């Protein structure tokens, strides 16, 4: 391997790693607040890319139907819950949050379907359409079992991923998409051509990991979000509603996943099921960060990207074996340094 | 007796129906039954691993794959017999499982499960790339299994092998769960500190459970290879591993029958979905299958987390088994001569980073006395307690027990030496009966191995251990219903049950961590009476307690700790009179 | 048996629908299903979900076209049962048994991946029911010498040999290889190595692999570049086969690209854009039907196929896969005609045997892909006229005579 090739591989690895960073940060964010390991995160990224592509090719993306169906379901559950709790006064508010707000982007996309829109508008529409999915899934799927063990939540999360992949195939079909490139800019770094697209991906990763770190360390909302994860009852006593904290986490996480989906789709073909492996590798990064630390997660996810790139050069057939094999020592290290005491798996 | 006879006859009818099935049912139903049996075998391993042992594994298909590839390689590349293939499959799977287990089973909680995903994927991706295994295309033309010249190619024939293996596996598992090691497996969910305090090698039990579950997956993999007669990487993806986990959870992961029920339900559900979805959604049935399936599973976990078997069992009338027949209890150890030093703590120190929780504390405990260790909150009592029981190691100092230095010993070695403990927050197995909970205490006094338990070679020893447990339940006054579930007892009785479990270990020293905490006055009085009786029987007791009144009336001597140091030591009357204690501790109360 | 499933016009409609029934009822329901029926039933399995779905859908469209082309034989209506195997070999195998044991089909067509097709073939051999493989298979003839099926695709080694010969003809001495890390990637690589050994193809300098959902193949492309090959052989399939080609062009590689019929995919062209222009692949003649000379064997049937495909599926048949299903159907139709001629009743073991006899008796059947002459004990038709070389020029595949 020459220095030139090593430079190429590093740039490639950092690009891939940056995508993983964005998704891994979402994993940590959601886990920190809700204790849910949100496996379908990669799917959210893939769905954003597929939605954007549908908008660009002037099709009505299937996500519209998905959002509408989820909104209806969540509203129904929420109204039933409020009616049972004899709090009908809160129903209008529930309708606003669970029905009206999610349906606004869906309606906007539906209304503009088939029109030729400028690139930034399609990107904003795709992001807006994707954002409600995870919070609505949280309401429908996770909130009834919010008190369950991490493992129960993980198992449900895995099942949810399967359901979403099935829906992805239904809505978007089996073929992959590539969206229009956002920039033709090219710059040489250490003899390696780096595209504007690559720079945007890296910049997004740096900016968002920094912002999240600041948000959690220095803002009251950030700190209260974290408090929810540590102790739900305690947080409630302190006036923090865990449900609301969860919704914020899912929204922020979806934004990260959505952005990564949008940034990756011009450089690589995205399929309805592309999210799983991307998500899984991002997850390796999140575990390096112990599912708690944003900076370490970002470094971990970058490491996975670079490792993958070099492994692919050395022996492409064993690339995945190497990436997932590395997870085991990482897990051992993490398990020993895990701050919390033993979590008993009890009934 | 009649209930037992009914169970036996129900079992006999069930087995007869299974034997008759190929003549009664249509061929495709037998094919379905084959898949159900095969999947149930893997799910059964998961029941032991996850439901019983509390280790959630997503990676069972990797073991299935190793076994399937082993036998396929043996039969297609080496042209050996499928039976040689079975030997290779079992040996190789056990070896890989033992290595993986040794590396990953120390991981805690969800880290362990994530670890199973990691090695599950790594092994899966290896299948297509290892030389000599047909790459990603796989190994075609795997021959059928033959038994005494009869080929099991037809699904109506391999059916017998599958269900025979499954029933044998269930029988062995059932025996195991009713044995010494089986109880240890069930105890794993209570957390390592409880398990180790009973003298059980938690990691060892985990590892063997893991290998047993892998062996079941290996049998399934072996059959799979000779049934599908084609082996390639895709079926051994983590996806299928997750499906197996779903089967165990849907059936009821805490129950052996849950494996069959779950496997049957999911296999039949998938088959039915395939049948009716096209009618409802003719255009997109294939895609919707997985969606509907996952949605049903999520709904299931939202509304019936425990699974179907416990749900149905709850509807059936319960019949308590008869009280066990009397047997000779296990031999007891000889208690040391009263009055001689039994436990001596010499300048024990424990630091947590910069904080010194216990600072050069020394005291001695004589055989046959009750010593109270008291102090205000944060005085270091609990840390001291953990040093004595081996849950923590001292940073400096020595702890001697019965003349032996136990300072560096592991928790379970200390338990084996004769120190039995209880917990401040009661650590019982709520889903186990009182009897089984107490029998856990006899672990160090019995020997039966996993194998002996599975093959029921442990019956004599079991009867003796059961007698010990019955005696100890009587000793603490909880023998009215030994088959009650521990979780159903009120807190006071749960504490007493913990003491019975500690007594079942036939300890030399009983160490109690705040036994009176959370008890009502009546319960405290009864507890004090019980402890006084135990002293009469010659047992040495160390109590760490917050409740002054409880301690004062019970103990022979008291050690007072404050800010990690020993403040003073003496009889209750001396302590009561000590002004330092009044200042530090009683002062605040008075 | 409900009357609804007799309606052949509704796709994927099948026998007893009994979702709500319990285990006992499910098992009981299938017990009395042993009687022979008067009509002919054919089972069709493909992947409509899972990783093979993108190819599976094409096979499915081919089936729709084939069934629209002809849904009866000698006045007897043919009932078609369609199943999705979810890209899983165990499911495919289970479905083969279901079709045979529960639905008593007279023959089976399937499925989208080589591995699943092999699994189904094993079931067909065991239960002695004719099987039309529409993906490449790799199966040994049973001890009694009776293979219960045939494979429609051109022999994979032939697909690669044809393009390897073209490379050699073009003066290519060395070629890099990037392919999928799956069975298809293995086939192409091994085929190219074999062709080189036999002196028919160039030397292969790399064996780089990637998977469909990978985010980048830059590392693999760099590895190829470092061996400085004259050309590149692409062992991917469908859309994502374009990824290494795009990456190599970005890295400044100027050599010619070659591939296999697996690249014949509309989305490959769309996604690949300029980078894939000029790629040459071996293909069945169905890809370039309109450019074929009028006397070409596949001109007439190919034209018919394209017309009916467009009518029932609403788009052009610009892939190779749908043609395999169509040809499989043609082979079956002739064989069933042969069996009915012999007076054998559908739904019986004798009918199964007669179909196989019919397949072997049929000589020089012109399909959209090849001229078929199957021989007992051999799964493949090895007629080299079934492959041509086509070149992608400005988004269209151009016949290279």
Image: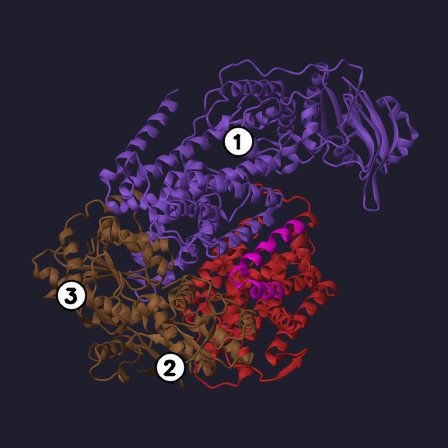
Chain colours: A red, B purple, C brown
Residue C394, image x and y in percent? 40, 86
Q: Position of residue C118 (x, y in %)?
A: 33, 56
How far apart, in angstroms, are the residues tagged by discs 3 and 2?
33 Å
Q: Residue furthest right?
A: B579
Viewed as shown, does residue B218 lie left or right of C313?
right
- Measured from the top left, where is residue A214 in percent x and y? 72, 67
Name the element at disc 2. Answer: strand
- In the picture shown, does residue A112 fall above or below A315? below
Q: Is residue C167 left or right of residue B582?
A: left
- Say what secondary structure mark 1 lies in: helix
Crowd tier of the residue under label 3, counting other residues whose Cα lies within 10 Å: few below 14, some 14–19, many 20 or above: some
Residue B415 numbered mark, or none: none
Q: Is residue B235 left or right of residue B196?
A: left
Q: Are marks 1 and 3 on the same chain?
A: no
Q: Which residue has dot 2 on it?
A: C391
Q: Front-most of C34 and B447?
A: B447
First-in-chain label (3 vs 2): 3
Q: In this rendering, does residue A147 appear at all?
A: no
Q: Chain of mark 1?
A: B
Is A328 included in the stretch rendered in magenta? yes
Question: In which image quadrant can residue C238 be found?
Answer: bottom left
Residue extent of the magenta highlight: A305-334
Residue holding disc 1? B182
Residue nearest the observer in this picture, C373 or A50? C373
- Using a 10 Å C-alpha cutoff, classify the residue at mark 1 as few (fewer than 14 neighbours), some (14 to 19) or many (20 or more): many
| Circle nearer the viewer, 1 or 3 | 3
- Circle 3 is placed at which residue position? C362
**Residue closest to the eye, B445 or C273:** C273
Residue B293: give x, y in percent of width and height: 40, 55
* Residue C389 falls left or right of residue B96: left
User: Does residue B425 sit above or below C223 in this rendering?
Assistant: above
Dominant secondary structure of the magenta stretch?
helix
């Amino acid at each position: 391997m020459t220095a030139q090739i090593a430079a190429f591989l590093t740039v490639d690895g950092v690009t891939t790693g940056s995508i993983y960073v964005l998704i891994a940060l979402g994993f940590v964010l959601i886990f920190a607040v809700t204790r849910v390991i949100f496996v379908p995160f990669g799917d959210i990224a893939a769905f954003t890319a597929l939605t954007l592509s549908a908008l660009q090719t002037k099709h009505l993306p299937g996500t519209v139907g998905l959002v509408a169906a989820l909104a209806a379901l969540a509203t129904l559950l929420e109204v039933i819950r409020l009616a049972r709790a004899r709090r009908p006064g809160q129903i209008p508010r529930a309708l606003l949050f669970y029905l009206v707000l999610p349906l606004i982007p869906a309606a906007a996309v539906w209304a503009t379907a088939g029109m030729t829109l400028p690139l930034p508008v399609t990107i904003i529409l795709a992001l807006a359409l994707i954002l409600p999915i995870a919070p609505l899934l949280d309401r429908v799927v996770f909130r009834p079992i919010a008190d369950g063990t991490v493992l129960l939540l993980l198992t449900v999360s895995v099942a949810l991923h399967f359901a979403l992949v099935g829906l992805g195939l239904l809505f978007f079909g089996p073929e992959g998409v590539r969206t229009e490139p956002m920039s033709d800019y090219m710059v040489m770094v250490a003899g390696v051509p780096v595209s504007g697209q690559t720079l945007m991906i890296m910049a997004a990763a740096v900016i968002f990991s920094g912002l999240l770190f600041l948000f959690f360390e220095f803002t009251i909302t950030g700190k209260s979000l974290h408090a929810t994860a540590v102790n739900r009852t305690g947080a409630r006593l302190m006036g923090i509603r865990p449900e609301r904290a969860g919704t914020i986490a899912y929204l922020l996480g979806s934004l990260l996943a959505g952005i990564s989906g949008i940034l990756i789709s011009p450089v690589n073909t995205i399929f309805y099921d592309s999210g799983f492996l991307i998500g899984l590798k991002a997850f390796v990064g999140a575990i390096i960060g112990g599912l708690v630390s944003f900076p370490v997660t970002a470094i971990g996810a970058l490491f996975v990207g670079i490792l993958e790139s070099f492994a692919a050069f050395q022996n492409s057939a064993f690339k995945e074996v190497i990436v997932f094999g590395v997870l085991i020592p990482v897990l051992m290290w993490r398990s020993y340094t895990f701050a919390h005491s033993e979590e008993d798996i009890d009934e | 007796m009649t209930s037992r006879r009914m169970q036996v006859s129900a079992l006999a009818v069930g087995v007869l129906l299974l034997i008759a099935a190929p003549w009664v049912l249509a061929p495709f139903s037998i094919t379905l039954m084959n898949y159900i049996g095969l999947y149930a075998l893997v799910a059964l391993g998961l029941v032991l691993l996850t439901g019983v042992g509390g280790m959630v594994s997503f990676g069972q298909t990797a073991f299935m794959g190793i076994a399937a590839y082993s036998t396929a390689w043996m039969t297609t590349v080496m042209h050996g017999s499928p039976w040689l293939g079975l030997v290779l499959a079992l040996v190789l799977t056990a070896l890989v499982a033992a290595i993986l287990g040794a590396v990953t089973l120390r991981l805690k909680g969800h880290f362990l499960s994530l670890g199973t995903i990691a090695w599950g994927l790594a092994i899966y991706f290896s299948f297509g790339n290892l030389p000599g295994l047909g790459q990603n295309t796989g190994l075609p033309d795997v021959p059928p299994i033959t038994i005494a010249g009869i080929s099991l190619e037809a699904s109506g024939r391999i059916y017998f092998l599958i269900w025979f293996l499954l029933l044998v596996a269930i029988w062995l598992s059932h025996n195991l769960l009713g044995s010494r090691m089986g109880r240890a497996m069930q105890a794993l969910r209570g957390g390592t500190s409880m398990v180790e305090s009973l003298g059980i090698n938690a990691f060892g039990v985990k590892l063997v459970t893991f290998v047993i579950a892998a062996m079941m997956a290996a049998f399934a993999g072996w059959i799979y290879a000779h049934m599908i007669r084609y082996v390639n990487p895709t079926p051994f993806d983590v996806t299928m591993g997750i499906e197996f986990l779903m089967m165990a959870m849907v059936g009821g992961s805490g129950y052996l029958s849950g494996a069959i029920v779950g496997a049957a339900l999911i296999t039949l559900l998938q088959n039915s979905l395939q049948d009716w979805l096209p009618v409802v959604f003719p255009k997109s049935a294939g895609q919707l299958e997985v969606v509907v399936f996952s949605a049903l599973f999520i709904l299931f976990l939202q509304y019936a987390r425990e699974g179907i078997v416990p749900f149905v069992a709850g509807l059936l009338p319960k019949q308590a088994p008869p009280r066990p027949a009397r047997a000779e209890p296990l031999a007891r150890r000889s208690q040391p001569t009263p009055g001689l030093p039994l436990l001596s703590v010499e300048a024990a120190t424990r630091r947590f980073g910069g904080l010194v929780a216990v600072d050069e504390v020394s005291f001695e405990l004589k055989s046959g006395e009750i010593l109270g260790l008291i102090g205000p909150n944060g005085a270091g009592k609990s840390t001291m307690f953990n040093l004595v029981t081996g849950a923590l190691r001292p940073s400096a100092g020595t702890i001697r027990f019965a003349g032996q230095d136990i300072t560096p010993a592991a928790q379970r070695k200390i338990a084996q030496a004769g120190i039995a403990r209880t917990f401040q927050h009661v650590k019982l197995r709520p889903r186990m009966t009182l009897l089984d909970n107490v029998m856990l205490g006899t672990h160090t006094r019995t020997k039966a191995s996993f194998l002996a338990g599975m093959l029921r070679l442990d019956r004599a020893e079991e009867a003796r251990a059961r007698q010990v447990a019955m005696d100890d339940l009587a000793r603490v006054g909880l023998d009215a219903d030994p088959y009650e579930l521990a979780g159903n007892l009120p807190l006071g009785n749960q504490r007493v049950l913990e003491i019975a479990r500690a007594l079942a270990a036939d300890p030399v020293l009983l160490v109690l961590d705040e036994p009176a905490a959370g008890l009502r006055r009546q319960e405290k009085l009864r507890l004090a009476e019980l402890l006084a009786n135990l002293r009469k029987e010659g047992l040495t007791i160390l109590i760490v307690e917050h409740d002054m009144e409880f301690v004062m009336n019970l103990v022979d001597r008291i050690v007072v700790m404050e800010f990690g140091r020993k403040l003073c030591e003496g009889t209750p009357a001396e302590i009561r009179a000590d002004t330092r204690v009044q200042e530090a501790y009683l002062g605040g109360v008075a | 048996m409900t009357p609804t499933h007799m309606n052949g016009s509704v796709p994927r409609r099948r026998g007893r629908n009994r979702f709500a029934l319990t285990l006992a009822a499910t098992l009981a329901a299938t017990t009395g299903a042993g009687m022979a029926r008067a009509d002919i039933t054919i089972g069709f399995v493909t992947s409509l979900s899972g990783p093979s779905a993108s190819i599976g859908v094409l096979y499915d469209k081919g089936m729709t076209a084939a069934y629209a082309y002809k849904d009866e034989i000698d006045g007897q209506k043919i009932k078609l049962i369609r199943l999705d195997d979810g890209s899983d070999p165990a499911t495919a195998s289970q479905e083969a048994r279901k079709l045979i044991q529960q639905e008593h089909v007279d023959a089976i067509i399937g499925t989208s991946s080589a591995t699943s097709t092999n699994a189904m073939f094993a079931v067909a051999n065991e239960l002695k029911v004719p099987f039309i493989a529409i993906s490449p298979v790799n199966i040994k003839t049973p001890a009694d010498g009776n293979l219960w099926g045939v494979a429609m695709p051109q022999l994979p080694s032939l697909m690669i040999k044809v393009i390897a010969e073209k490379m050699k003809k073009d003066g290519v001495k060395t070629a890099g290889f990037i392919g999928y890390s799956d069975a298809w990637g293995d086939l192409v690589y091994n085929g190219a190595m074999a062709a080189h050994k036999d002196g028919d193809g160039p030397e292969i300098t790399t064996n780089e692999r990637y998977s469909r959902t990978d985010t980048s193949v830059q590392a693999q492309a760099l590895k190829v570049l470092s061996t400085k090959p004259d050309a590149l052989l692409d062992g991917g399939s469908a859309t994502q086969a374009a990824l290494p080609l795009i990456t190599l062009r970005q890295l400044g590689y100027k050599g010619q690209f070659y591939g296999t019929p697996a690249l014949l995919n509309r989305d490959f062209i769309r996604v690949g854009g300029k980078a894939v222009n000029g790629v040459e692949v071996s293909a069945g003649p169905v890809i370039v039907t309109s450019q074929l000379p009028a006397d070409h064997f596949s001109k007439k049937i190919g034209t018919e196929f394209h017309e009916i495909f467009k009518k029932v599926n609403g788009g052009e048949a610009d892939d190779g896969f749908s043609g395999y299903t169509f040809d499989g159907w043609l082979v079956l139709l002739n064989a069933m005609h042969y069996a009915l001629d012999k007076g054998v009743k559908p739904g019986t073991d004798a009918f199964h045997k007669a179909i196989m006899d019919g397949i072997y008796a049929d000589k020089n059947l012109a399909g959209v892909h090849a001229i078929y002459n199957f021989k007992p004990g051999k799964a493949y038709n090895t007629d080299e006229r079934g492959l041509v070389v086509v070149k992608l020029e400005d988004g269209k595949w151009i016949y290279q005579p």
